[in-house]
Amino acid sequence: MMDYKPSIRRKITFGYYAGVAVIVALFVFTFTELIIVEKQLNFGGIINEFFDMTLEMRRFEKNFFLYELNSDYQENLQYVTKAQNIISENINEYLTLVVADRLSALETVLKEYRTLMEQYASLKHEDPKRGAIEKSIREKGKQITSFAEDISKTERERLRSLLDQSRIFLAIAIVVLSLGGIIVGQIMSRIVVRPLKELEKSMEAIAAGGRDTIDIRSKDREIASLTAAFNKMLRELELRQRHMLQSEKLASLGTLMAGIAHELNNPLSNISTSSQILSEELEESDVAFRKEMLHQIETQTERARNIVRSLLDFSREKEFKREILTLGNLIHETLNFIKGQIPARVSISVEVPEDIVIFADKQRIQQAFLNLIKNAVEAITDEGSVFIRAGRQFPAGMEKPESYVQMLDNSRCKAFGDDVYITIRDTGSGIPLEILPRIMDPFFTTKDVGKGSGLGLSIVHEIIDEHDGCIGVYSEQGKGTTFVLRLPAKDVRFE
């Protein structure tokens, strides 16, 4: 059964729809509030219109009582009719409002008012009943005006309350949306950004040599797949890097063969000469002489055997294993490999105290020394020198340029207190300042096409790095180049 893992895409989709749902809900609620406010505004307009009608109605009522003009009476009835129409047309729509009961009472009072006006108009001027009816009309008119004012005031207060509620709701909605955005942002950070940040930190750690795999604890399918893909890529890169190192090492063997042939030629010549002398003087020579010749043959044979053993050790791929090595012997053995390749115009000076030791893998560190010395020799086009020095402190009297500080004293290169500083300086043509930061990039070379793979210094950097060491370079055009190596003198991994 397939192991189910949650998907970032699903989480993002769910968060998106949840956010949309919240926004839609807020929109619906806001829209409903706006409808209610709109209804209240419309009703307020109706009440204002009704109030205006009552004022006109009362004005013509007063004129009619003063002047007894039929036109004033008719105008009064017209405004009464308009007021009644306003109430009758809107009472059903606004029955749900707080003032619905007052609307019904107002409608009743208007009918009574109209009836009294009609009675008053039908009576003759000298009729004694008119006084009582006039009083009732005035009371009803006053009651209608009071009702209208009361309803108008109530609706204004209610509208103001609704607007206050709307403002409060809007503030709440803004706060809710802001908090929702922050929460969604935090969730998205946990889901997507945080794993990617961990991935970035892991890649930085890998670039610094702190680890060789990525371990991001995430249940999301995409992050798990990305982690697996990166780890697979890192394994492939490590494998290819090993193959590249071995290929470069084997390529170096071609250039070593002439030097090895020269080194082997001397003991073989001595063996041949001693054997020839021994064969010619075999019968006439005494035992001591024969023993001396045989001893020379044995010594030169052992010398040739050591040369071949060193070559085989250098070319054979072995497990990385560090040990305490005497630096002077290691440098001289490395020089023997390329002695035949060093032109007569180039002199090599070695000053390494006998008590200086390093904690390193012999094969790997010898490869690094070999590449640096070869580069130093090849950088000298005319007569020149290569100087190899070593000590416990940074070389005395040598200026410490910024490039040294950056590469030897940065956070990626930890000083252990018991370190060895090795300088390899040539008097060659130097390296242009603009390309100096790139010389250790893989496949970058300043040599002519076909004369260099561009892997030599990259492999040196890799070897020094895996030894917990550092490498710095300083160069001036026309004055030469200096490489400074810092390597631990003992095993510091468990201290």
Image (spheres, helix red, strand yellow):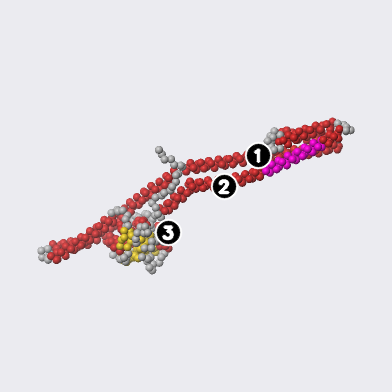
**On screen, residue 181 above or below 450:** above
Task: Determine the residue located farthest toward the left in the rendered image.
Answer: 283
Identify which amino acid the numbered label 1 is placed on.
Ile
**On screen, residue 279 above or below 238:** below
Identify which amino acid the numbered label 3 is placed on.
Ser
SS state under label 1: helix
Q: How many marks?
A: 3
Q: Is residue 383 magenta?
A: no
Q: Which residue is mark 3?
A: 411
Tag 2 and tag 1, C-beta contact below 8 Å: no
Q: Tell which of 348 and 138 is nearer to you.
A: 138
Q: Residue shown at 40%/48% (left/top)?
A: 230
Q: Residue shown at 33%/60% (left/top)?
A: 359
Q: Is residue 43 visible?
A: yes
Q: Which residue is mark 1?
A: 36
Q: Position of residue 194 (x, y in %)?
A: 47, 49
Q: Earlier in the sequence, mark 3 or mark 2?
A: 2
Q: Which residue is mark 2?
A: 178
Rounded to the nearest angstrom, the CA distance separating label 3 from label 2 is 41 Å
Which is the main secondary structure of the residues drawn in magenta? helix
Q: Is residue 139 magenta?
A: yes
Position of the C terminus by quadrant: bottom left
Task: Determine the residue located farthest toward the right in the rendered image.
Answer: 126
Q: Position of residue 180 (x, y in %)?
A: 55, 45
Range of magenta residues: 137-161
